[in-house]
Image (tube, rainbow, N blue to C red):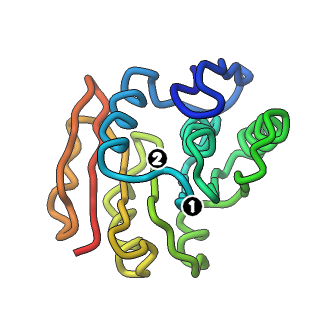
Amino acid sequence: MRIIGGLLKGLRLNPPKNLPVRPTTDLAKEALFNILQNQIEFEGIRVLDLFSGTGNISMEFASRGAAQVTSVDRSIQCVHYLKDTARQHGLANIKAYKDDVFKYLQLETEQFDLIFADPPYDLNRIPEIPKVIFEKNMLLPDGLLIVEHQSMQNLSNHPAFVEQRRYGHSSFSFFRMV
């Protein structure tokens, strides 16, 4: 696992083996950031990373100049790893919180330019993520929600759905404010 762009480009991340995670592969992450690079300006954006796990995606956004990256995961080990790694590499723009994502979403009142969610693939509540985010108006105008999920899952029935990109067994579904 490595940072593929920005200030920390090339940095290898070596999280402990015992973290309860399934990190986004470098191939899928590189494809995702190639898509995003042509759609958004990373410098100064506000990002919410849900089910952040190792913080791989949070670190990528922070490395590319995001003003603020809020990371949420229910594993305290993951939160500690991300906080320690961010501190070690001078990424003060990352704030990591231990919380249940659905409880966090109910209480969050801020808006974001981009929200990325990478829930466990076996989570049966994945379709609720776009529903809650759009009902709570959590995206700024022109904001983007990306949900990573199994390729066999279809999230296209949400009115804000734009497209699904498949990378083997993983897919990214994109949602925009309508």
Residue 153 screen position, x and y as percent = 23, 44
**For this rendering, which residue is in front, 97 or 42?**
42
Three-letter amino acid code at the position of disc 2: Pro
Q: Residue at x 58, y 81 (%)?
A: 109
Residue named by callout 2? 119
Percent of width and height locating residue 120: 47, 42
Cβ–Cβ below 8 Å for labels 2 and 1? yes
At a point 52% along the width and 25% down the height, the residue shown is 4
Which mark sits nearer the N-terminus, 2 or 1? 1
Q: Amino acid at mark 1?
A: Val
Residue designated by label 1: 101
Figure quadrant of residue 77: top right
For residue 80, above or below residue 1: below
| Distance from the alpha carbon under mark 2 to that under mark 1 | 9 Å
Quadrant of residue 160 within the rendered picture: bottom left
Is label 1 in a helix, a strand or a loop?
Answer: helix
Left or right: 23, with 70 as reference point: left
Q: Residues within 10 Å of mark 1 (few under 14, many from 20)?
A: many
Asked whether, in this view, residue 165 is left or right of residue 105, the answer is: left
